[in-house]
Amino acid sequence: MINSVLETERLVLRPLKADDAAAIARLAGDWRVAWPIPTIPHPYSLDRARDFLRAARRGAAEGSEYPFAITRRPEPELIGVISLRPQKGHSAETGYWMGVPFWGQGYMSEALGAIIRHTFCDLQLQRVYAWHIGSNPASGRVMQKAGMRHEACLRRHVLHRGEVEDQVYYGLLREEFLASGKGC
């Protein structure tokens, strides 16, 4: 899985590389990208991007997280990041962000669809889930477009940038994915 490359009609999801640091710092450094994601600090420096890449490589080597650079065909430059974190047993959590210049073009739903397919078809897991803060409903729409279903809202559950926010969960089961006709 560490060297997996996932392809869609318009995208290539590939392992992160050291030379992705500048694009990560530039794109994730935009407050509009960083604000809704608790794990992205702001400001986001090149050194932080390098630290993220080192941690991502460690996680991939240990099997605790599989981060992918999202790129557009045929361009190799990173436009966002999506990760898959296998949980004990049969499920995985996914999380993602996309650079502002690439918003509103359906890229994230397409990338999430590739991760979902990989989760069920290649890894043979039984469940994938994701969550977003309540004040970021656009992320929930991405999850819905990729076929995920609303599962729960933990009201005022997470402290996020000094505010208490709802934590909204979406998930998809393998049998639901297969029944959707997308198949493996």
Image (spheres, rainbow, N blue to C red):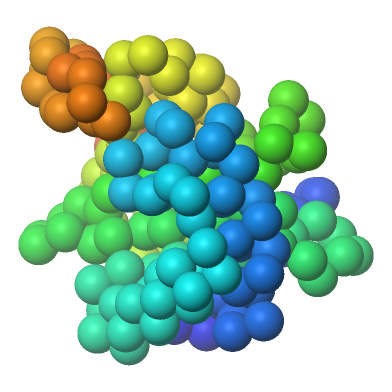
Q: Is residue 89 left or right of residue 171?
A: left
Q: Is residue 113 above or below residue 166?
A: below
The structure residue drawn at horizontal position 48% and vertical position 50%, both measured from the top left corner, is: 43
Q: Quadrant of the N terminus?
A: bottom left
Q: Give coordinates of residue 132: x percent, y percent.
A: 34, 28
Towards the viewer: 63 or 120: 63
Is residue 62 among the parts visible in the rendering?
A: yes
Q: Quadrant of residue 66?
A: bottom left
Q: Is residue 98 left or right of residue 116?
A: right
The structure residue drawn at horizontal position 12% and vertical position 14%, both measured from the top left corner, is: 156
Towards the viewer: 176 or 109: 109
Q: Is residue 88 left or right of residue 50?
A: left
Towards the viewer: 37 or 83: 37
Q: Quadrant of residue 61?
A: bottom left
Total marks shown come to 0
Q: Is residue 139 above or below residue 65?
A: above
The structure residue drawn at horizontal position 22% and vertical position 19%, both measured from the top left corner, is: 163
Q: Give coordinates of residue 145: x percent, y percent.
A: 56, 23
Towards the viewer: 106 or 89: 106
Instruction: Specify the farthest residue to the right.
Output: 74
The structure residue drawn at horizontal position 60% and vertical position 61%, both measured from the top left corner, is: 24
Is residue 116 among the parts visible in the rendering?
A: no
Q: Is residue 7 left or right of residue 92?
A: right
Q: Give coordinates of residue 49: x percent, y percent.
A: 50, 69
Q: Give coordinates of residue 6: x percent, y percent.
A: 62, 65
